[in-house]
Amino acid sequence: AQKITQTQPGMFVQEKEAVTLDCTYDTSDQSYGLFWYKQPSSGEMIFLIYQGSYDEQNATEGRYSLNFQKARKSANLVISASQLGDSAMYFCAMRESPLIKAAGNKLTFGGGTRVLVKP
Amino acid sequence: NAGVTQTPKFQVLKTGQSMTLQCAQDMNHNSMYWYRQDPGMGLRLIYYSASEGTTDKGEVPNGYNVSRLNKREFSLRLESAAPSQTSVYFCASRRDGEIWGTEAFFGQGTRLTVV
C-alpha cells in the first residue's frame, strides 16, 4: 500500500497567489516526521519544511507553511505569494520513527505535484 | 562542505553490464539512502542504511545490491543492467538518532541509461 499519496499531478497558479499542495499519508506509528521537498527542472532536491507528528503548531518557513491535520493524516503544503521561481516538482515525504523500530529509518516519498506559476 | 557527492553523473550501459554507483557524504550522518526516479515520477527507495555495516531493502530492491563499508560511503551496484533500470539515481544522507528528525541531504543524481 502506498504510504504517501499526492493526488494532484499538476497545477497552474497565478503569480502572487497562494497554492495548496495535497499530501496524505499512511502509518501506524505514533511518532513520525513529514517533509516537503522542491525539485526544480535542474534536478536537485531542496528541503522546504518539516513537521513532527507531536508538534502542536503547524510548521512555517518563510512563504511555506504546512497544514497538518493529524486525524485526517494529511500534511498539505501552502505556498503563499507564488513566484515564477516556485515552478517545480514538489514532493511530500515521511520518515517513520527510528526509536520504535530498529530499521525504522525509511524516508518514503510521494509521487509529486508539478507546479507551474503563470506570470 | 561538499555534502553528498555521487559519481558518475552520467552513465550509459549495455544490457547485462555491471556497474557501481558511488556515494559519499562528509556530514558524519548515520543514515544513507538510494532512490531511483523515473521520468515524471516520485522517488522510490531502493535500499537504505541506518548505520555502518547495516543495510535494508526499500520498495524496489530487485536487481540491486548495496554496500556500506564505512560511515561516509554507500555504494549501489547493478550486477546485470536491464533497460528497466534506466532512471535517475539519487543518494541521500541524514543525521539520525533524534525523534524530531532532520532533513535528508541529496546528491546531484546519476542519470543512467541502459540500452
Image: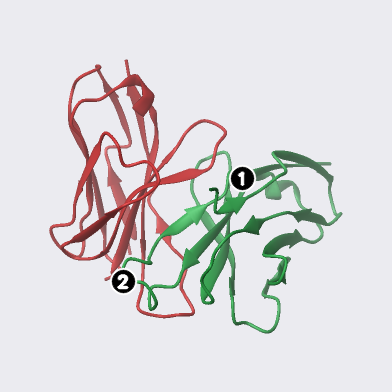
| Res. B2 visible in picture | no
Image height check: is A59 above or below B17?
below
Residue shown at the point (31%, 59%) measured from the top left = B32
Disc 1 from disc 2: Cα separation? 28 Å
The chain containing the residue under callout 2 comes to: A
Extreme residue toward the bottom, this view? A56
Image coordinates for residue B110, horizontal then vertical, percent? 35, 38
Q: Chain of mark 1?
A: A
Secondary structure beneath dot 2 equals loop
Residue position marked by numbered label 2 in the rendering? A102
Q: Residue furthest left?
A: B69
x, y (%) of residue A87? 69, 44
Spot occupied by residue B111 in the image (x, y as percentages of width and height): 37, 32
**Discs 1 and 2 share one subunit:** yes
Q: Which mark is residue A112?
A: 1
Please tell me how crowded label 1 is: few (under 14), some (14-19), or many (20+) other residues with Cα within 10 Å: many
Relative horizontal placement of residue A41, taking residue A67 as reference (left or right): left
**Which quarter shows the C terminus of chain A?**
top right
Q: At x 57% / y 66%, what residue is drawn?
A: A34
> Where A53 falls versus B114 (above or below)?
below
Place residue A18 in its image quadrant: bottom right
> Callout 2: few (<14), some (14-19), or many (20+) C-alpha neighbours within 10 Å?
few
Q: Colour of chain B?
A: red
In primary-sequence order, the first of circles 1 and 2 is 2
Expressed as whole percent of the image width and height from the top left, the position of residue A103 reads 32, 66
Taking B80 as reference, is A98 above or below it?
below
Q: Residue at x 46, y 72 (%)?
A: B102
Circle 1 sits in a helix, a strand or a loop, which is it? Answer: loop
Q: Which chain is rendered green in the image? A: A
Instruction: Check disc 1 and give the amino acid type.
Output: Gly
What amino acid is at disc 2? Ala
Q: Residue at x 86, y 54 (%)?
A: A17
